[in-house]
Structures are given as C-alpha cells and as structure tokens.
Image (tube, coloured by chain):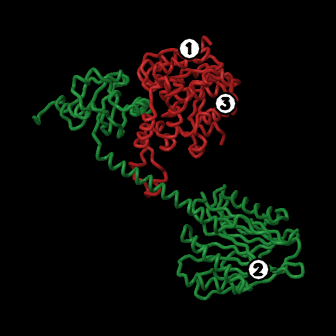
Chain colours: A green, B red
Amino acid sequence: MDLDHGADDLFEHAPCGYVVTDRDGVIVQANAEFLRMVGREADEVIAVRMLSSLLTVAGRIFVETHLFPMLEHSRVVREIDLDLVAADERRVPALLNASLVSPETGRAVLAVFIEARDRHRYEDDLRLATRSAELAREQAASLAETLQKTLIPPAPPHIPHLDIAAAYRPAGTGREVGGDFYDVFQVSPTAWIVVLGDVSGKGVPAALVTSLVRYTVRSFAIEHPDPAELLGQVDAVLTANETRHYCTLVVARLDRHDGEWELALSLAGHPPALLRGPGGEVTELGLFGTPIGLVDVPGFVTVRHRLQGGSSVILYTDGVTEGRGPNGMYGEKRLHELIHGLPDDVHAITDGIARAALDFQNGDASDDIAIVTFAPHR
Amino acid sequence: MNLSGRLNVTMHGPVGAPPIVFVHGFGCGQVMWRHVAPAFADDHRVVLLDLPGSGDSDLSLYRAERYTSLEAYRDDLVELLDELDLTDVVFVGHSVSAMIGVLVANAAPQRVGRLVLVAPSARYLDDDGYVGGFSERDIDELLGLMERNHLGWQDPLASLVAGAAPADVKRELEDSFCRTRPDIAAQFAAVTFRGDNRADLADVGVPTLVLQSRNDSVAPMAAGAFIRDHTEGSRMTVIDTYGHCPHLSAPAQTISAIQEFLEEH
C-alpha cells in the first residue's frame, strides 16, 4: 500500500470497519475491514442491505430506542457495545462510534466498528466477578441480620408485677450489624437483670464482642448480685479477650421485696438511666463508671433505689441523644422534656423516644438506638 | 414532594386549555417530544413527564418490587391526572406508553378523552400465531446488551468508593435524557417487551389514533394493524418514515396527523 494514499484509500484500508448508510439505513459504502468482520462480499452488502439487518434483533431494538434518539439529539454516539452478525450467523462483538452524515440527510449515518473480542471476554469476566461480589455481599448482609436477631430478643419476657418495654432501631439501612443490644433475664425466683449496652464498632467483629458481653453478663449475674461487681467481672473477661472493641453498659438488678421493687444499678461508661417520677419529673440515676475493656483500672459504683408506684426507669444508648438533625444534636435536654410529656406507660415512653429520635434525624438514624423502659406494674 | 414533582412534570400552554399529555416510551425521557409538543402549546395545556425511573424522575422513589408490570405505571399516571385534576385528556403515548395509555383510559375513563398511540405494539413476543416480531431469546439478548451499555451512567456509589472522580468522569453527557440507571432500564425493558396487552384493547372506549411508522423494526405494521383491528373506534395513520420514533424522524407529519385526528374527534 502506498503511503501517499488519498482519502478513498484511507477509508478502504483503515484498520477499523467503516460504513455509511443513506437516510433509509441502507448501506451505501463499506470498507474492507467491515466486510471482513461480517464475512461478506461488497456486492452482498452495498446498496443491498440495511445496516440494522447486520445487527442482532436486540441490537436493532437498542438502536431504535436509544441510539437514534441520541444521534438525533447530539449527532454522535460513542463507545456503544454491539454485536454484528456475520454471514455464518457468528456474533462479532464490536464497539461502535457513529455520527449523522448531515442534518439534511436524516438518519444517514457514518459508523465505525472496531472488533472487540478480547475486551468482551475481559468484561464478561468482570461482570461475573461483580455478580459474585454482589452475591457475597448479600449473603454477608443476611448473615449479619440473622446474627443481629440472636442478639436482640424479639420482646422482653413477661415479669410479674413489672411492666417492661424495649425498642431497637438499627442505624441507616439496617443491613449492618450494629453494636447496641439489650437483654432481660431472671437470676432468682424474685430477681431479674436488665442490661443494655453499646459495643464500639460495627459489623461481625463487633457482633462477636456483643455476644461475648451478653453471655458473660448472664453467666456472672447469679454469682454476683451487685451490679458493680458484675461489671468488674465482665471488664476482666473483655480485657483478657484482647479485642480492640470496648463497650458501655448499664446493668440494673431488680429485686422484689415486700411487694416493692428494689433497684440496684451500675454504669460502665454509659449514659445514666432516667427515672421518671409519678409527676413526670425526670432525674438521672447512676454514677459514672469506666467503659468495659478500655482502661487499666476500671471502676464501677452501684446505686440503689426503691421504685415507687407511678415511676418508670428508662435505659437508652447514645444513639438517642447523639442523633444529629438539622437542629444539631438531639441531646439530653430534649430527651428529658420529651419523657416528661409522654404518657405514663412503658410502651408509650419507649416508642415515643424511638420515634422522636428517628424523626429528629429525618428517619435516617446515624447510630443504632436501643431503649428499655420498666416500671412497677400499673 | 407531590407526584408532579417526582415525575418531573413540565407544563406549557394556556392554563385551562384542553389538556394533552405526552408520555415517552422505553429508552429516553420527555425530551423525546421536543419537536412535537410545542406545536400544541398554542391551544392546549401541554403536559410532559418522565416515567418513574426514566429521565429526570425522582429515582429514590423507584422501587423494583413495585414496577413489575405496566399496571404500576398506569396507577401512577391515573394518580397524576387526579393530582393535576385534568379531564378529557388527549393521551399521547409512544411505544410502551401507548399501552400504558390504553390502561389509563380503561381505568380512568373520566380523565381520558382520546388516545394517540405512537408506534404501539400490544405484544412484542411472537405467540401462537400472533407475530410480535421478537422471541424470548431476543429479549434476553436485549437485557444483556443494556447491561453492557450504560450510556454514561455512573453508579454514584461506585464513584464514592473510588474516591473523588476525575474531571473527565464527572463530565456531564449531553444525552442524559437517554441515560437510565442500569437496573431500572433492564427492568423497564423486561416489563415492556414481555408484556401482553392484547386483551386490554377491547375495553378501550375512547376515539383512538394509531400512528404507525412505515418501516419500524420494533413495532412493525402488523402490530399497529392488530391494534387498529381490535380497538373499537380506532383508526390508523401511516407516517412515511423509517424507525420507531416518528416524533423524531418525521415530526411535521406526526403533528399534522395528531391535529387532524383532534379536529375530527
């Protein structure tokens, strides 16, 4: 081939398939590479075939529903992945660029096809890999949900002479295991433990720590009736575990004496419990303690309180107070005012707090929310 | 946001004039009507919209489990006509939206006065003697083809994961009106091409115009003729053009065919 060739030669011998169609889509020019790709002679194609007849049926639909509207709008389309159909029915994967010949000639186009077999194989591999990654992600998410369900009891157990309600709202989409949990269980014929906590971090590693903490609390609770002592034991176990996760906890032990509930409560780096008195007044309950598994010298204090008729105790995680909305952080003050105004009923209080915390963040919680409310049976 | 906002409704023409609603088909959004709709804005209230999942509709409201059949689109459009309180509407639907128009007219006869079906097909798949023009395999291939051609769509999550997108990735493509989120495009394609609305034609009780393109490989002449023959009070006008979008390839003829129909009915 002469290097000093003219435009016709450039068209004819270009290393990509060139096609020109008239306004009716009939091929009026095609070069050697295009004819090679479709495995046909010039006289079988030029002035005989419509370009669309050399595409798959699916390709024709795509051209009609997408490419022509785009061509008509912008006069050019680029990087379209289409199969040509060769004379022997073989599919020839190709990349297409096309432009309108001129505004006056309607659908007349100049099209360039580049064979793309290798690229196709590579992309097919990528698509397969993407699909299996998606599948794996879905399986992980579903595993996480299952795990979460084992950590959050569906409903607190029935306890004689005590009303109790609980709520749990996962952060965001809820597809990831959060660190909040609660548990309610019996330790003697007349005594119960209510525990609520927040493990740092998220995902399966955090869930394993949640599980460890929950069962450690359960196994030491009978032996250690004092909540501060119990927290000391849990701290030792978590420290020995060498996990980088720590947690905050509130442990409340309820003993039934002479027709009344005695409350013993201890905090481990957790927000104080809230006591709602018979008149709706809200006070904090509990003294600061160190988080579990975080410091070398832990310290916990038990406070005791006799629950009066008409009062309620609310345990919550910081997902309630630290939720951010357009008006800043929800905060303790708003929470106290809210609880003051809620009806005197453990379910109304629990649901009211959960709803207010979510509404404040426009329904999209940035952190998990866990709430447990209990009160002497009304 | 109300439904008009979610479906990116735009309105032109005198308030209170007889309403004409243009609904785009599978592929691109309301911009498809840009050569035709303005011709009606002198004496009509022209309403344009993007179907759920298409064009500039609010994608956060697209739920895959809802849009599994044309009935979901019908319900949205009936709700939209209620919201806008339009009556005696001229419903102009292209391609799949021609059939959505049939469903809307049947479900809300108090709202729709006339139907204009542009390049319609009541059934795309060949079926026991009926020639729709396509096989199941063709439709599977179409879904594969669409998976390979995102037309510039970029998953906002993927770009987040990759960090700040370089400027050339962020470039806005002019043809955003044909760019649809890939999973939505695939579902809409499946709903469109696997649907069968032949039985709905018998219930049409309003004057109907079938606008048939002379050479349409998606909705061939036989598909238009089938609709004319099975829709009482319908007529067919053939537009001498190529392709599935006569409103793009032959806007003047499309406009005059619709105007003629509106004058007579």
Report which quarter residue B86 is drawn in: top right
Q: Foreground residue, A269 or A338?
A: A269
> Does residue B71 show up?
yes
- Answer few, some or many: residues within 10 Å of disc 1's Cα (few below 14, many 20 plus, some between 14 and 19): some
Residue B262 got which mark? none
Q: Which residue appears at 77% of the width and 77% of the height? A: A192
Q: Which chain is mark 3 on? A: B
Q: Earlier in the sequence, mark 3 or mark 1?
A: 3
- The residue nearer to you, when weighing B240 against B5, is B240
Q: Callout 1, which amino acid?
A: Arg
Task: Name the residue beneath numbered marker 2.
Answer: A253
Indicate the quadrant containing the N terminus of chain A: top left, top right, bottom left or bottom right: top left
The chain letter for the residue carrying disc 2 is: A
Q: A130 above or below A28?
A: below
Kindly identify the amino acid type of the residue bearing the numbered disc 2.
Arg
Residue at the left extreme?
Answer: A2
Foreground tag (3 vs 1): 1
Q: CA distance from mark 3 to mark 2?
A: 61 Å
Q: CA distance from mark 1 to mark 2?
A: 81 Å
Instruction: Give the side of residue A305 with respect to residue B108, left or right.
Output: right
Q: Is residue B259 left or right of residue A98?
A: right
Q: Which residue is mark 3?
A: B81
Splitting the image into 4 quarters, where does residue A167 fall? bottom right
Q: Which residue is mark 1?
A: B235
Q: Secondary structure at mark 1?
A: strand
Q: Residue at x 29, y 34 (%)?
A: A112
Estimate how packed mark 3 is, as few (under 14), some (14 to 19) or many (20 or more) residues with alpha carbons within 10 Å.
Answer: many
Q: Position of residue A10 (x, y in %)?
A: 18, 33
On the same chain, marks 1 and 2? The answer is no
Quarter residue A362 falls in: bottom right
Circle 2 crowding by C-alpha within 10 Å: few under 14, some 14–19, many from 20: many
